[in-house]
Structures are given as C-alpha cells and as structure tokens.
Image (cartoon, rainbow, N blue to C red):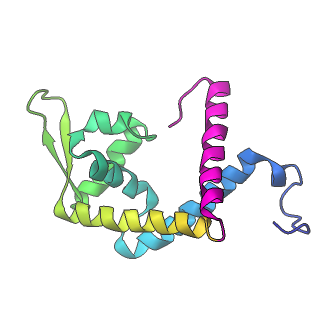
Amino acid sequence: MPDNDDHIHPEAAVAPGYLANHAARVFNRLVDTALRPHGLSLSLIGPVMLLSWKGPMLQRDLVRSSAVKQPAMVALLDKLEAMLLISRTPSSTDRRAAMVELTEKGLEAAVFGRQALLAANAQGLEGFSPDEAKSIVHLFQRLIDNLERQDGTNIS
C-alpha cells in the first residue's frame, strides 16, 4: 500500500479488520465481474456452490449451512429457480419442507462459480510463495477464530 494514500485513515491502513474487509470487497467485485457474463453474481453462486458440494438438501438445511438468513435465501432460491438453476420439490418426509437440487444448468453454473472463485483467490495470492500462501490462510483463520471468540458467535 503506498505511503501517500490519503483516502484511508492511517489507523485503518494497518488494522487487520479493515484490511480483511477491504480484501473481501475487492475479491467480491472480481468474482462478480467474472460471473456477470454468465448471468450470475456472487450472491447467487453461494447456494449453487453449497448444493454442488453437498448435493440436494432441504431448504432449511441450506439456510443453516450458509451465512444467508431465511428471507434472503428464499429470495435467492426464487431467482435461481426462475433461472432454471435449481429445482424445489416437496419433501417426502415433511410436507412443509422443500428439497432443493441443482439442475443440469445449475451444475454448469457451479463450474463457472468454482472457476471464478479459484481465479480470484489465485489473483489475490500472486507473488506469494506456497509457504506464504499457507501462512496467510493460517493467519486469517486465527484472526477469524479470535474475532468469533470475542464476539461469542460462530460466523462461519
């Protein structure tokens, strides 16, 4: 970061929380830019990636397994269903529950999502040695653990 960067408060420029948040915003923009040509966004790809990883799951379990709250998840799933990326069917064991599953088009979207996420992470780690990359991951994990312990919540 340049020393003459006067649009960032000097205390923020060396604050891990600020830097992590700023890195996340830049990362999110990179991923959104990569996904846009496919009609996707980072918010839409989240449930797609989770379903790609875990397979079909109840809608309530999808909410529990993500950082997205119920009302926002319902809106995302409505949009994904309209885009024909997922299908929702009534659960065979609970009439009030819906099973969510990726369609063939959703599986293709998961491929684009994975590529965009991997590419953005690779761009962020350009110039880092393998040991430095491992260290930064470890240090972020410790930062998150410390913040979660202080906060009393589990964000992940």
Q: Is residue 1 left or right of residue 134?
A: right
Give the farthest residue toward the left.
92
Give the farthest residue toward the top.
152
Residue occupying image coordinates x 57% and y 62%: 27
x, y percent for residue 89: 13, 43
Residue occupying image coordinates x 49% and y 69%: 119
x, y percent for residue 145: 61, 33
In this view, 22 is above or below 156: below
x, y percent for residue 154: 53, 30
Q: Is residue 6 left or right of residue 142?
A: right
**From this viewpoint, is residue 83 visible?**
no
Residue occupying image coordinates x 83% and y 59%: 8
x, y percent for residue 116: 44, 67
In this view, 82 is above or below 90: below
Magenta region: 127-156
Q: Quadrant of residue 74?
A: top left
The quadrant the N terminus occupies is: bottom right
Q: How many marks?
A: 0
